[in-house]
Image (cartoon, rainbow, N blue to C red):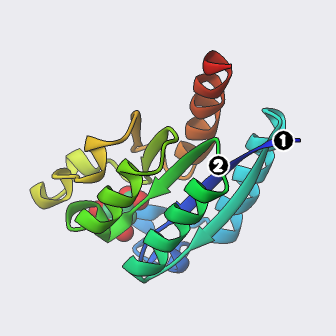
Amino acid sequence: MAKTVYVLNGPNLNLLGTREPDIYGRATLGDVEKLCRTAAKQHGLAVVFRQSNHEGEIVDWIQEARSKKAAGIIINPAGYTTTSIAILDALLAADAPVIEVHISNIHARESFRRRSYISQTARAVVCGFGIQGYSLAIAGLAAMIEAKD
Ligand code: DHK
């Protein structure tokens, strides 16, 4: 059976395509999902793709990934990147490689966007590639998973 990776998206990413397009581009979250499914298929992985505006729901999904023994978690924590110890703690307990993704280059923006709690547990961070960052994250995660086997 194919290994499963969770792709989790935080607050306001449901607005992709219309939200600050100069920063986040014109692609929608549906486009991101398609991209992830195509990339995952190329690497023989199954994908659970979700978005929530609610911190607790994201924590629940990380715990679900843990209980279902997901092979990895790709997360764009969006606004929770710099605030959520609860999401960090859930990821620390997840027992699977975590890749942090940001569509924009957070280092070229306001300084508060750089202080990521999530990076403390991420095996890798991808930022600034637009939505292509998600397929890069899937390729990188697939290589990590293969290397472990
Ligand atoms: C998305 C957000 O919503 C912001 O809160 C982050 C991130 C950056 C992104 O680039 O995908 O600061």
Residue at position x 65%, y 60% from top? 32
What x and y, as percent, mark residue 35? 72, 52
Classed neighbour count for the residue bearing mark 1: other residues with Cα under 10 Å, few (<14), some (14–19), many (≥20): few
Along the viewing direction, whichever of 103 and 54 lies nearer the viewer: 54
| SS class, disc 1 | loop
**Image quadrant in which you'd find residue 78:** bottom left
In the depicted structure, whether residue 142 falls above or below residue 133? above
Along the viewing direction, whichever of 31 and 93 lies nearer the viewer: 93
Residue at position x 29%, y 67% from top? 86
Q: Which residue corresponds to mark 1?
A: 2
Q: Is residue 31 left or right of residue 88?
A: right
Q: Which residue corresponds to mark 2?
A: 69
Q: For the residue with label 1, is its CB less than 8 Å from the closest atom of ligand 1? A: no
Classed neighbour count for the residue bearing mark 2: other residues with Cα under 10 Å, few (<14), some (14–19), many (≥20): some
Q: Is residue 119 left or right of residue 142?
A: left
Mark 2: amino acid = Lys
In this orientation, does residue 138 appear?
yes
